[in-house]
């Protein structure tokens, strides 16, 4: 086949450790032979973020705003150990958090289902998509240790001269306690709601939203009210025409409903709830390495990535020259998601078809019994039909399937 031409570049955000190695394998084996790949490249590896004082992350997010579609490799979020390991100037923030805040986006995560990998919940026959609000709450919290007697207050001083304050806690014991202040922005909650409603319409799936308004009568209740207001005013008719539904329920009720469901819907969660529940769903469906993730901004920008981390343990083995068997499927699907969206926006149907076929090649490879170690350990296939391969062998096997499909 002739190599596919692209019109608009993808914003390419490179990353760290084993996923950075896989990133290059994917480009060399599964993309460059078939596409005249057009990208605007940003190195979000921890070393270069440190060299640029993290400006490269901001530049990558702004490029995403400019071009509309990005694909991102997994990156290290620095902690004290990483500061020492990489001799960093400071403990730089999570690149994901920075990009999410600048795009004001919502993260949608869904499992990649494949025959032979059976969900732990037997009724789940269709994917469940988590929509995670990607701003605020404990991820933007301020915290304090106050190991003494005293009074903690919540204070707001308005620009109009108004003043409000509430007592949080009277610490009467000498040991005192700890404090945490969280916030969210009304505009961000509105963006979250619209992103969820738009995504539900584009995928023709029911939308659930869950929080804890019975306990959090102001904070969580505001989320609930804003969702309902925007739905009633802007989306109710479109949902009815599309044949899908929206409803709100308490987070604990939502968990019970999810477990009893067949899947096939979007579950919208606040930031922390979405962080936890997406990992729970990924594991329950089989593997965090089999989870797609896309950040969607309210103004229509998309950033695709794998839902997992940089696979540090495999990377250290790789540096020692040892063989690794790292699952690359979620990273491949990050590329296919971005290429498909780029093809859709630029009206390049052959690029969209290529993305579809590359995904099918991945799934066909696993269903044929060729898989990495993580899947070989959990597959329901008969063991004699399973052929465990290393990292690069799996990607080459996918390429063989892709050649046959093309």
Image (spheres, rainbow, N blue to C red):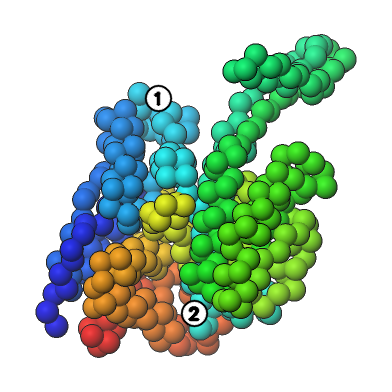
Picture coordinates of residue 157 (x, y %)? 65, 17
* Residue tagged 2: 114
Question: Where is residue 212 drawn, in percent x and y?
Answer: 76, 49
Name the residue at the left extreme. 2
Residue 189 percent location from the top left of the image: 59, 45
Quarter assignment of residue 148: top right
Q: Residue at x 60, y 31 (%)?
A: 141
On the picture, is 169 further left or further right than 83?
A: right
- Can you name the residue that lies furthest to the right here? 172
For the N terminus, the quadrant is: bottom left
The answer to which of 374 and 76 lies nearer the viewer is: 76
Q: CA distance from mark 1 to mark 2?
A: 42 Å
Left or right side of 101 for 393? left
The residue positioned 63% from the left and 66% from the top of the image is 236
From this view, report whether residue 155 is shown above or below residue 229: above
In primary-sequence order, the first of circles 1 and 2 is 1
Can you see residue 125? yes
Viewport quadrant of the C terminus:
bottom left
| Nearer to me, 27 or 185 | 185
Residue indicated by mark 1: 90
Q: Is residue 365 above or below residue 346?
A: below
Q: Is residue 186 above or below residue 114?
A: above
Residue 33 seen from this side: no
């Amino acid at each position: 086949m002739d190599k596919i031409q692209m019109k608009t570049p993808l914003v390419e955000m490179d990353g760290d450790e084993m996923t950075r190695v896989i990133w290059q394998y994917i480009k060399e084996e599964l993309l460059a032979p078939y596409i005249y790949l057009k990208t605007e490249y940003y190195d979000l590896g921890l070393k270069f973020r440190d060299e640029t004082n993290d400006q490269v992350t901001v530049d990558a997010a702004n490029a995403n705003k400019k071009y509309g579609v990005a694909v991102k490799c997994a990156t290290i979020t620095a902690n004290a150990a990483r500061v020492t390991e990489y001799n960093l100037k400071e403990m730089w923030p999570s690149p994901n958090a920075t990009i999410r805040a600048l795009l004001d986006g919502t993260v949608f995560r869904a499992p990649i289902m494949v025959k032979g990998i059976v969900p732990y919940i037997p009724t789940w026959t269709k994917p469940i998509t988590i929509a995670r609000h990607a701003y605020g709450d404990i991820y933007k919290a301020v915290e304090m240790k106050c190991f003494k007697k005293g009074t903690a207050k919540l204070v707001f001083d308005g620009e109009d001269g108004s003043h409000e304050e509430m007592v949080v806690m009277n610490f009467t014991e000498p040991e005192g306690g700890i404090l945490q202040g969280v916030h969210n922005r009304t505009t961000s909650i509105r963006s979250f709601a619209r992103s969820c409603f738009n995504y539900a319409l584009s995928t023709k799936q029911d939308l659930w939203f869950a929080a804890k308004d019975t306990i959090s009568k102001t904070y969580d209740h505001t989320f609930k009210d804003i969702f309902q207001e925007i739905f009633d005013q802007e989306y109710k008719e479109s949902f009815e025409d599309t044949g899908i539904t929206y409803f709100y329920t308490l987070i604990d009720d939502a968990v019970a409903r999810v477990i009893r469901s067949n899947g096939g819907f979007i579950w919208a969660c606040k930031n922390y709830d979405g962080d936890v529940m997406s990992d729970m769903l990924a594991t329950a469906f089989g593997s965090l390495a089999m989870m797609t993730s896309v950040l969607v901004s309210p103004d229509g920008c998309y950033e695709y990535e794998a839902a997992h981390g940089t696979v540090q343990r495999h990377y250290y083995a790789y540096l020692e020259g040892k063989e690794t068997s790292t699952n690359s499927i979620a990273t491949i699907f990050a590329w296919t998601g971005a290429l498909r969206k780029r093809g859709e926006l630029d009206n390049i149907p052959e690029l969209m078809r290529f993305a579809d076929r590359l995904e099918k090649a991945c799934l066909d490879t696993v269903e044929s019994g060729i898989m990495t170690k993580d899947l070989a350990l959990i597959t329901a296939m008969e063991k004699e039909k399973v052929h465990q391969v290393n990292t690069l062998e799996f990607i080459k096997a996918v390429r063989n399937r892709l050649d046959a499909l093309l």
